[in-house]
Amino acid sequence: MLNSILIRRYNMPNKFTSAILVLISSLFFINPSYAEPVFAIKASIYKLQNEITVDSKIEQALKNLSPTHQPQLLTLLNKSAMIEIGDDTQMTALEVKPNAEGSHFNASLKLKEQVDGKWESISSFMPQIPNGQTVYLSRTFTDKVWLIKIIGKRYESIKRAEQALNQK
């Protein structure tokens, strides 16, 4: 179809040529106001010593600690996204899936570590986390407490989601 339009272009006066080119270009460029909604996730993963307890004052306890990883994910509504971080001895995987409206999302954390040459793993799952809410998942695994802070939020476009993820 595009070739037939371009071939006809040569037989038309300039004002019609311009109108056709504007029409064609409008088909290739999407207006940001019509962009597809996305879901953005910010996560902070902490590997803590067993002596640290996870309680209601968690934000205060984390102020003096640095996260091991801080992955960020973008996904379409009703689609899964996963990030795996690690090496040959340990692996952390975070998977999220928002619902079709972006009002809630599910989060799954999987930890794998090699102990005596064998992989051991443990998972945590939290369903139906409300849009914009901060949640914490924690697991004790191979003498460490793994804690993940997750915030997920729906945005109307990839551009807006990327801007939010880049803010501190």
Image (cartoon, rainbow, N blue to C red):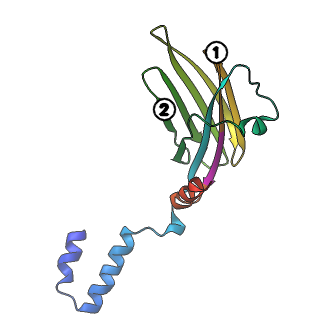
Q: Quadrant of residue 61?
A: top right
Q: What label does residue 143 carry, if any?
A: 1
User: Horizontal and vertical percent for residue 160?
Assistant: 56, 61
Between 155 and 12, the residue placed more toward the observer is 155
Residue at screen point 60% across, 22% down: 123
What is the three-letter code of the residue carrying label 2?
Ile
The region drawn magenta spans: 150-154
Q: With respect to residue 116, does 160 lie above or below? A: below
Disc 2 designates what residue?
A: 85
Residue at screen point 21% across, 82% down: 9
Q: Residue furthest front?
A: 64
Question: Which element type, helix, strand or loop, lies under badge 1?
Answer: loop
Residue at screen point 69% across, 40% down: 129
- Tell me whether the residue at label 2 lies in contact with that at label 1, contact meaning CB atoms closer than 8 angstroms: no
Residue 36 appears in view: no
Report, in whole angstroms, how far the alpha carbon at label 2 lies from the one at label 1.
19 Å
Quarter of the rendering occupied by the N terminus: bottom left
User: Horizontal and vertical percent for residue 33?
Assistant: 54, 68
What is the three-letter code of the residue carrying label 1?
Asp
Position of 2 with respect to 164 (left or right) is left
